[in-house]
Amino acid sequence: MSMVPPPFDPELSAALEAIRDVLPRQLTMDEIPAMRQGPGIEMLAQLDLTMDGAFAVEDRLVPGPEGASEVSLLICRPTAPERPGPLPVIYHVHGGGMVVGNNRVGMDAPLAWARELGAVVVSVEYRLAPEHPHPAPIDDVYAGLLWTAEHTEEIGGDAERIVIAGASAGGGLTAALALLARDRKGPRAIGQMLLCPMLDDRNDTPSVHQMAGLGVWDRTANETGWTALLGSRRGGPEVSEYAAPARVTDLSGLPPAFLDVGSAETFRDEVVAYASRLWQAGGVAELHVWPGGFHGFDGLAPQAALSQDSRGGACAVAAEAVRGVRSRPRRPCPPPLSASLERGDPPIIPRGCRPFDPATPSSSVQSVRWRVRVGGGWSRSSPHP
């Protein structure tokens, strides 16, 4: 089997060169403390989570798992909702390879969806590995969901319209959360959004080997993240599906799923396989494979044409979930960059990248998108128990 990697999208390749010194491809256990103190984490404190006053922001500590400390939730509620009554809730799980991050990581995407849809966002902070191995992270995420479902009225939300969402490690934890909620007969989400999710601890698919030493979060980094979470159990026969959802044997009875991934990233094959197994189990799933996308490309190069397509597609699916309809909106949700453009602020464009010009599509736009929907639509009336 050829281990020649697929090419990066040209715009994304230029962005990757611009950030390569800030975001290393590889990560070892010794480098985790430095990553936690890196510039990306420091920048999170400067994010305007209110989106220019569109949201009221609150940090709240809620009961954690039995015998554990409280869990921190970041709650963002629309200040002027367009519609009266309870609002849909996006329950967000942050990324960071299981080893870095907090509940502010990756919030630009769910806040953009929520601003367009009129939704509450609740982002959970979980204990990190290796100091807190499995099951600590998923236990915290589940505890946060329990509190959210039980207090939706208090935060202006609708307990019948909760979408769970996460990217990277957060995507893997979101998939695990859907499994755990099903098996414990806990709160049932109306949809799960798994964005470039980290699903398989075995770290041995063709895409894992193809992308070794390339892009963002390569095989070495992946091994570090899974080893931090699982220790010597990583790759062995005793790994729980609530740690690595790719290990699950029963994928029936789950909420409709949206999965997306880049063609040029480590997680490509495990994400495609997970979507296929959801369909084989009779589930509802939609899969987008973005040609030439590296891991997390839409957040790291938001001005690229492929990133704008990806962000718009995810937002459209979120709209379907909370509105219970299958039709796509006529225009995609604006990516976070659009807010600064509307205000007249200069956009931040990584060195070597050009601003996106709709009249001049990049070669990536002319490439074939792999977008597959099988098993019905996003609706509370979808045929699942």
Image (tube, grey):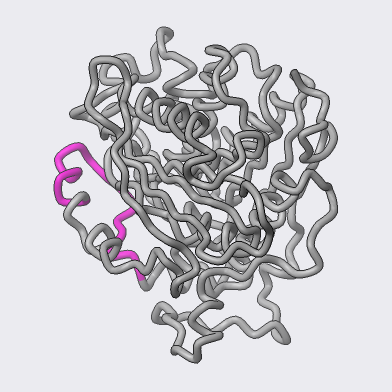
Q: Is residue 273 above or below residue 208?
A: above
Q: Position of residue 40 (x, y in %)?
A: 28, 61
Q: Residue at x 50, y 25 (%)?
A: 176
Task: Let me know if residue 1 appears in the view.
Answer: no
Q: Is residue 132 above or below residue 237?
A: below
Q: Is residue 291 above or below residue 95?
A: below
Task: Let me know if residue 10 appears in the view.
Answer: yes
Q: Residue at x 29, y 34 (%)?
A: 224
Image quarter in which the N terminus is found = top right
Q: Nearer the viewer, residue 321 or 349?
A: 321
Q: Nearer the viewer, residue 189 or 256?
A: 189
When asked about the image quadrant of residue 335, the answer is bottom right
Q: Is residue 12 left or right of residue 142?
A: right
**Magenta-span inclusion, residue 26:** yes
Q: Residue at x 65, y 50 (%)?
A: 85
Task: Tell me the magenta residue range.
Answer: 19-35
Q: Is residue 321 left or right of residue 236?
A: right
Q: Nearer the viewer, residue 6 or 132?
A: 132
Q: Position of residue 155 (x, y in %)?
A: 48, 45
Q: Is residue 300 left or right of residue 283?
A: left
Query: How many tags in the picture?
Result: 0
Name the residue at the top extreme.
238
Image quarter in which the C terminus is found = top right
**Magenta-span inclusion, residue 16:** no
Q: Position of residue 83 (x, y in %)?
A: 68, 59
When asked about the image quadrant of residue 321, the answer is top right
Q: Residue at x 38, y 40 (%)?
A: 124
Q: Position of residue 11 (x, y in %)?
A: 54, 73
